[in-house]
């Protein structure tokens, strides 16, 4: 779901870059010294997850784990994902530097939104297993919608592609949901302190 350089219009690049700067400043304002290590660890996990490719017919999907990262980091997710996206763009060629703001918007905002949903107990009507599944599923769904929206706003010829992106990424949403379900179950048993600030 990374957007490469040269894809977006200059208006979208400028707009998403300004929004991205706002997100990162918010992260820097709210981050606590004791959380710097876990922010670094989650940034590394996001970076490494992109190496895990799952074959799906003629294409492949890769993990992002933004649901788990979001509920662990809260507002610090913007800083963590900025670092990871910057490293991916410069070291691996995933995404790009001019599209960094757009990619941060696409990945980090859904991650933060799921944190807000869980923290404010909007998913408490679900059973534990369904809640954990949707913590993984919903951010990827939102990321896909944001990706389609940014592409459609950028160039008219991307409009058709933006419609198909959501359907193509449905398997990724389901896989993320299932992996997140198992990850949260594991964290609840092995490292419950990581989830201490969230209502699970």
Image: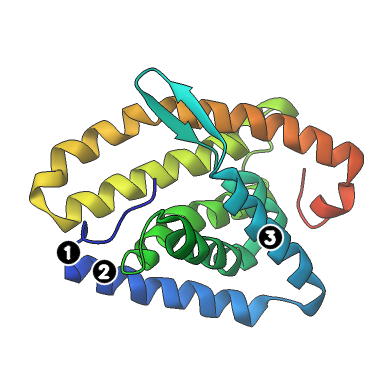
Q: Is residue 31 visible?
A: yes
Residue 77 versus residue 114: which sits nearer the camera?
77
Marks 3 and 2, Cα distance to the nearest angstrom?
26 Å
- Are there few (<14), some (14-19), or many (20+) residues within 10 Å of tag 2? many
Give the farthest residue toward the front: 91
Disc 2 is placed on an element classified as helix
Find disc 2 in the rendering and name its residue: 13
Is 163 on the left or on the right of 147, as rendered? left
Q: Is residue 7 above or below residue 165?
A: below
Q: Nearer the viewer, residue 90 or 6?
A: 90
| Residue 165, quarter of picture | top left
Q: Which residue is mark 1?
A: 9
Whole-number angstrom distance, CA of label 2 to CA of label 1: 6 Å
The dot on residue 73 is 3
| Nearer-N-terminus badge (1/3) | 1
Question: Which of 187/199 is in front?
Answer: 187
Q: Residue at left 39%, top 45%? A: 1
**Residue at x-position 46% and y-position 55%:** 92
Q: Earlier in the sequence, mark 3 or mark 2?
A: 2
Kindly state the secondary structure of the residue where label 1 is placed.
Answer: loop
The image quadrant that residue 166 belongs to is top left
The reply to whether the C-beta atoms of the residues labelled 2 and 1 are less than 8 Å apart is yes
């Amino acid at each position: 779901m990374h957007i490469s350089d040269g894809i977006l219009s200059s208006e979208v690049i400028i707009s998403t870059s300004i929004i991205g700067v706002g997100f990162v400043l918010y992260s820097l304002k709210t981050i606590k010294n004791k959380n710097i290590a876990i922010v670094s660890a989650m940034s590394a996990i996001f970076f490494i997850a992109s190496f895990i490719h799952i074959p799906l017919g003629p294409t492949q999907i890769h993990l992002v784990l933004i649901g788990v990262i979001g509920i662990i980091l809260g507002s610090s997710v913007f800083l963590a994902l900025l670092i990871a996206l910057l490293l991916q763009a410069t070291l691996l060629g995933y995404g790009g530097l001019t599209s960094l703001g757009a990619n941060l918007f696409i990945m980090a905002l859904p991650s933060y939104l799921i944190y807000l949903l869980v923290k404010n107990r909007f998913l408490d009507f679900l059973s534990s297993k369904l809640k954990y599944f949707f913590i993984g599923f919903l951010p990827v769904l939102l990321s896909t919608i944001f990706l389609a929206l940014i592409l459609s706003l950028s160039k008219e010829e991307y409009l058709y592609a933006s419609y198909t992106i959501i359907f193509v990424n449905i398997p990724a949403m389901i896989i993320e949901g299932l992996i997140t379900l198992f990850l949260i179950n594991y964290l609840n048993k092995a490292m419950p302190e990581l989830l201490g600030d969230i209502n699970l």
